[in-house]
Amino acid sequence: MTDLRTFLPPSAADLFLRDVELRAEDPDAASTIGMVLHVTGAVPELPNLQEYVAARLSRLPCMAHILHGDGRQARWVHADPDPAHHVSARRVGSGPDAIEAAVRDLARDPWPDAVPAWRLVLLHGHVPDGFALLYLTHHAVQDGATGVAVMEALFGPDAPTEQPATMLRTLPAEPRPRMGQVLRSAAVLLRHAGKHHVWSSPSQPLSSRRHTSWIQVPVVRLKAVARASGASVNDVFLAALGHALAEWASTSWPRAAETPLPVMIPVSLRTADEWAAPGNRLFLTRVDLPGGLLPLAQRLARTSAVTAALKLSGHRAVLRAALTRLPAGLLRRLVTVSTAPGRLTLAASCLVMRKQLRYGDAVVNRIDPVMCCPPGAPLAVVMLVYAAEASVCFRIDEALPGAESLPARWRQALEDLSAAGERPPTGPGAAAAAAPGPGPSTE
């Protein structure tokens, strides 16, 4: 059994993600996340896959614990996973649409009580020379960074079966951030703490039904735009998303047409010693992306400016200190306030899988993420970068008129950014369009 001294207790975010789905009117809004590994090679025998996974579970405590209790009584409880229960197989029809339909269906399945909330489903029959491995888990027990770690531990190069020694150590003491940085970080957080009501429409209330779609783009395109503009890949992803939202809102959602677009960015604060610990190690930080129909170069520059604080190690140290040092009751209050009607908004995150994955001789050639979108949120988007391809999962409230067009709009915005980066700026306004300019205002 893993030494529980290495675990932080369940956080306010863990409890929120467990409890919020109880308000959902449809299982589309459940707190289920995961990823789909598309594999080229012979379809494995199910007993062999179960045995393979079982041999590696001892080093993955996030797959052997359940969240029990509420408030101060909340704790992680050890529960031995049974591979025969957690690892299954399903034959699907031919073609990529069959896989997507199976993923949508399986993501709606409820989690049984008293067993760890994860499943691995072998999907086959859709292609003649391969299969897919669908990994699903509950967001209260694992965050995106944990999902990446689990997949790398199970299917990464030379994935060992022993438990790493780091999981048996107590967590090291963390230095206190300097007061100046604390004040600067507090100012950043407070600047984006107000209500925005962008998604509060009495005539068009949000629902629990979700459109779910995936779109893939070459990583080289994202990196080329980032390199040409001096931004990060995540900035490019967010700028294209902001452009897609502003373009859609201009005709379909007037509340978001000309105003800054509030977006929740999960900042991962997981340390090396916590790589497979249960629970979320993130801080949801709001940024206001530039709104309106701006030139793309200007939008990207301003997006990079508003995300600058999230990239600073000092700011991240303050967020980590808040996660580990603030009283649990205060953290619960912060989560309650930030997710209240009028404040809850879309979430956008970016994950990177740095290791090449495989199962035996069968090679993983693409990974599609699976995102959740809780009740009260209009949409949620996650991009997962793996090898030469980035795959983006959109979970969009069906109550938003015409919002199923957002994935195509996002890809078009990225293509336009890429095309603009290949052309040198011309004309007297070129320098002004590329300048960062002031950050968007806060409502």
Image (cartoon, rainbow, N blue to C red):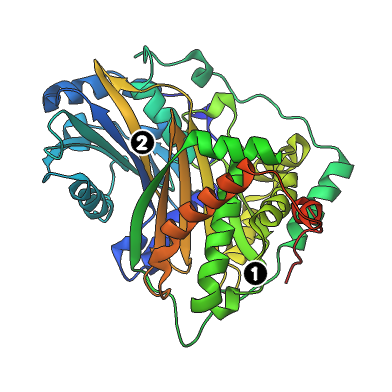
Q: Which residue does the image show at 28% across and 41% down from the upper left?
A: 115
Left of 374 or right of it: where is 130? Answer: left
**Residue holding disc 1:** 292
Three-letter code for the amino acid on which mark 1 is drawn: Gly
Give the class, few, some or many, for how many residues have Cα within 10 Å of label 1's Cα (few <14, many ≥20): many
* Residue 143 shows up from this direction: no
Q: Please say if 201 is above or below 432.
A: below
Q: Which mark is residue 367?
A: 2
Q: Which residue does the image show at 56% across and 19% down from the upper left?
A: 169
Q: Residue 302: where, in percent of width, then height?
A: 72, 54
Q: Residue 94: where, in percent of width, then height?
A: 12, 44
Q: Residue 427: where, in percent of width, then height?
A: 77, 55
Left of 384 or right of it: where is 312? Answer: right
Quadrant occupied by the C terminus: bottom right
Three-letter code for the amino acid on which mark 2 is drawn: Ile
Q: Please say if 336 is above or below 213.
A: below
Helix, strand or loop status at disc 2: strand
Q: Residue 241: where, in percent of width, then height?
A: 54, 56
Say which of 277 and 373 sits in front: 373
Question: Mark 1 and 2 residues: CB-CB less than 8 Å, in contact?
Answer: no
Residue situated furthest right in the rendering: 180
Of labels 1 and 2, the one closer to you: 1
Q: Which residue does the image show at 36% across and 70% down from the upper left?
A: 398
Distance in Å between CA atoms under marks 1 and 2: 33 Å
Which of the two labelled residues, at mark 1 and mark 2, occupies the earlier sequence position? Answer: 1
Q: Which mark is residue 153?
A: none
Helix, strand or loop status at disc 1: loop
* Residue 290 shows up from this direction: yes
Give the class, few, some or many, for how many residues have Cα within 10 Å of label 2's Cα (few <14, many ≥20): many
Residue 340: quadrant of the picture: bottom right
Q: Please say if 1 is above or below 420.
A: above
Residue 125: quadrant of the picture: top left
